[in-house]
Image: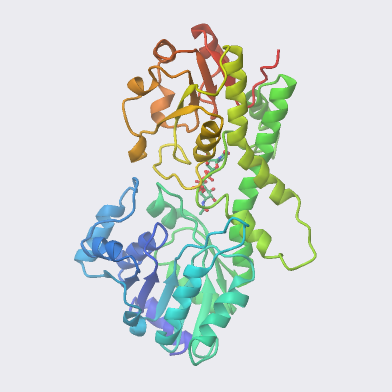
Amino acid sequence: MSLRDLQAKIGRKEARLAVIGLGYVGLPVACMFAQAGFDVLGVELRTGCVQKVNSGSSPIEGNEPGLDELLQEVVAARKLRATPDYQALRDRDVILICVETPVDENNIPRYEALRSALSSLGPVLKPGALVIIESTVAPRTMDEVVLPLLESSRVGKLNHDFYLGNCPERVMPGKLLKNLRTVNRVVGGMTPETAQVIVDLYRHIVQADLDPTDCITAELVKTVENTYRDVQIAFANEVALICEAAGGDVWKVRELVNKSPGRQMHLPGAGVGGHCIPKDPWLLAYGAHDKDLALRLIPAARVINDQMPLHIVDLLQDALQEAGRSIAGARILVLGYAYLEDSDDTRNSPSAILVQRLRELGAQVVIHDPYVKEYQGNLQEMVTGCDAAVLMVRHQEYLSLSLSTLKSRLRLPVLVDGRHVWDPEQVSPVGFIFRSVGRGYRK
Ligand code: SAJ
């Protein structure tokens, strides 16, 4: 089938789609193309996930507005079904690949899932089919990993026997469906014609801009946009450390800096977690790893952000010292374990770094998080008998905490705020020994 024939089939919604990987990226996009009227096959190796999807039940944890209902609707309408069998891909005209692309402890991309998906897809790929990579990959991966794997695993050449592009995901947990509809997308194609066909396809589900370009640009845009965020957060964190040392208040400073045209200082805090921001700067850096280019700012930003949970420990030690207590043997209540407010997602959580360090220093740690199953519980009971409370995540529940009740239940009036929940004017009258990221406390 020619690209033009495929473009026509997409226009008539007759193209048969497939999504490889039914996680927080693949499942919503599969549901939305199915809702748009396409026949969609989900390929997923986790059989438990396959069974849940085929029963119309979402395997995704956390609150995703509309996803459960949409999944039930499209499965009942037989527009979406899931299978672990790659052979089922033989009749698919368009295949989206939405598998994980983590980095390892040396910050090197790990493409096992991507390579496995491509190697299994190649031999069953229908002639004239279009392959679209949604996973976030390091610049040059399309040219140096994806294309060679597809060409080596099947008889055929690019732009003759199959077509290839990338449309990096821009999902945000908690608003997966809304963002798919409303967030602009960059669309990379191995040829401009391929990029246009991919734009035509996504136009069926995306109401925002679809910007066609080449694959290397799409790879760079996705990794740069998250690296931008990481560097901006690191800047805010370093300014917070300066404010602490200089006796300033970073929150007042940030508010007034951001009144200056063109400034948008981000939020300093207890660290940077999640599945995107800690990883994507390393994917971007890897795009130039074999060139004689010494990156300094991007790696330094990662170091600054990864140090912030340890800085919270320093603030806690300082406050406990003022209360005449060492951290060894102290009982510490950690408020929040998810990486993001009002989420149950704990991937790369800064709280995990904090808890590990506290235990290394001999503290007993009590963890509360209203969204993370293993840490749910009665907060008032959990705080009783603790020597200090450390706020790590700005969950809604914590914003309305009674400070006087909190103090009455703590053995020592020690409170550390990692996410700007409280101001000194609220805390001091209650009699806390208070430390907060970005606020000078040096006498
Ligand atoms: N954080 C800060 N200061 C900030 C913003 C975030 O310390 O100013 C921390 C958060 O507490 C969290 C981490 O950084 O631990 C990541 O927060 P995030 O708001 O960036 O949320 P993510 O990880 O879900 O990022 C996703 C990204 N989306 C995609 O990769 C498709 C990111 O590009 C979005 O900007 C972000 O969602 C969003 O804006 O919701």
With respect to residue 306, does 6 lie above or below?
A: below
Q: Residue furthest bottom?
A: 155
The quadrant of the rendering that contains the C terminus is top right
| In the image, residue 247 above or below residue 338 | above
Instruction: Residue 236: give x, y in percent of width and height.
Output: 66, 36
Which percent across, then down, holds residue 219?
60, 65
Locate residue 392 relative to residue 85 in the image: left or right.
right
Q: Which residue is nearer to you in this view: 315 or 338?
A: 315
Residue at 53% of width from left, 59% of height from top? 102
Residue 145 found in image quarter? bottom right
Residue 268 visible:
no
The image position of residue 42, as x and y in percent, is 33, 70
| Number of dots carrying numbers | 0
Picture residue at 34% right of the left edge, 53% below the top:
60
Q: Is residue 236 visible in the rendered structure shown here?
A: yes
- Foreground: 276 or 214? 276
